[in-house]
Structure formats: C-alpha cells, structure tokens
Amino acid sequence: MEELIFGEEPRQKTSVWDDYVPIVTSGRTTDVYLTDAIDAPKEYNKLCHILGTAYKGDTVVLHINNGGGYVDSGFMITNAIKNSKDTVKARLSGTVASVSTIISMFCDDIEVADYIQFMIHNYSGGAQGKGHEMKAQMEFTDSELNKAFTELYGGFLTEHEMELVIAGKDIWMGKSELLKRWHARKVGDKEAIEAIEAERKAK
C-alpha cells in the first residue's frame, strides 16, 4: 500500500513583520525594512506603489541592512525613488553592499550607524542558452551595466575608482568615509572626493 506524504503547509503570516519587506506607516511617515537580500522585483511592488502615490510632504524611510541581490529590483526601486514626490531617507546599518549601495545613492539623505560595512563592487551573474545567445547577452550586460554604474556612483567615487571597480576591485568603507563622500557628492565637491581617494592610497 502506498503511503501518502504531504508537505508542510505554508506558515501563515500573522503580522506585517512576517512580510519579506515589512512596511509600517504612521501618519505621513512610512518605514520600509530592506533587511533581507534584494530579491525578485515582485517583492517591491508595494514599496514602489507607495513611492509612486506619495504626496509632497510624505516621508519614506528605508532601513537598509543587506548584502545586495537582484540588480533589476534595485533599478526598479531607484526609478521609483527618482519619480517620487515624497522625501526618501536611508538608514544604513550592518552591511550595505552591492545593489543596496545603489539604492542609497538615490535617497535624499542618509543616516549611518556605527560599524557600517559599505561595499561597492561590479555586478556578478551568469547567462543561459546557446553559445551565441550567451555571448550577446553578456556583451550587452557588461557594456550597459558598466555605463550605468559609472553614472550611479558619479560624484561619490572618482573616475579612477570606478575603473578599478569595473576591473573587479571591491571598495569597502566605514561610517566616516561614507559620510564624507556623501556630503561631498551632495555639493558637487569633486576635489574632496579626490582627496579621500588620496587618503586611501596613503594608508
């Protein structure tokens, strides 16, 4: 006699904190917790809807603490931030890496916790299909993403640093350097960014 084996039923969500991306609204402020890997775009539909339907004077606070993930989702979020009428702030803590650093670049302001590990690097991934299809995809991805990264980190990294990132170097920074770069970028102080790079070389 065959035995029927049933899998466990999916765990029922009991509160907003069970959501992959918890979102809590109080008055005109919405807190969004990006504290797990940046997953498939569908996980960010509600966030993008909130950003797209906000009124001037509303505030969205992104609590970011994750190692990155899907670049497509990151670009979807950054596009929503760019087109939003509200003020978007980022509260960075723990590890903020890869595409999560890109998201932070588009916020109106940032708050940085002590002991932050902020890491910028080039994309990683793969392709499937026939040989010529994979080659075409990788050539397009490499060209477009490298061009995008140069624009996304413009004014935050020097041109030389961007070349290093595209060549495969990871750039790590803590709270002090991160804030110095952020404020220099806000006022367009290219010389300050170059001075920060010089300090790095001198260490």
Image: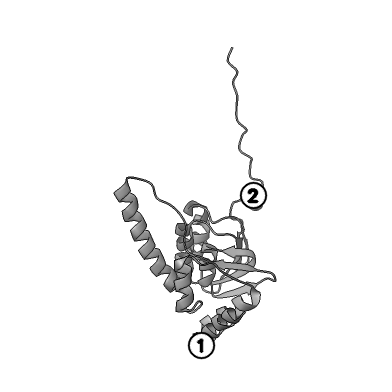
Q: Is residue 7 left or right of residue 115?
A: left
Element type at marker 2? helix
The reply to whether residue 16 is visible in this rendering is: yes
Rendering colour mode: one colour
In which quarter of the view is residue 137 placed? Answer: bottom left
The picture places residue 109, in percent across and down from the top left corner, at: 57, 75
Is 99 or 15 nearer to us in this picture?
Answer: 99
Q: Position of residue 117 (x, y in %)?
A: 63, 67
The three-letter code of the residue at mark 2 reads Asp
Q: Which residue appears farthest toward the right when viewing the image?
A: 114
Q: Quadrant of the N terminus?
A: top right
Q: Secondary structure at mark 1?
A: helix
Q: Quadrant of the C terminus?
A: bottom right
Q: Residue at x 52, y 56 (%)?
A: 69
Query: Residue 183: which numbered mark, if any?
Result: none
Where residue 191 is drawn, which disc sits there? Answer: 1
Q: From this viewpoint, which residue is outermost toward the front?
A: 202
Spatial CA span between label 2 and label 1 = 46 Å
As drawn, is 104 to the left or to the right of 129?
right
Question: Is 183 displayed left or right of 17 in the figure?
Answer: left
Q: In the figure, residue 192 lies in which quadrant?
A: bottom right
Of badges 2 and 1, nearer the viewer stands 1
Q: Is residue 23 above or below residue 163?
A: above
Find disc 2 in the rendering and name its residue: 18
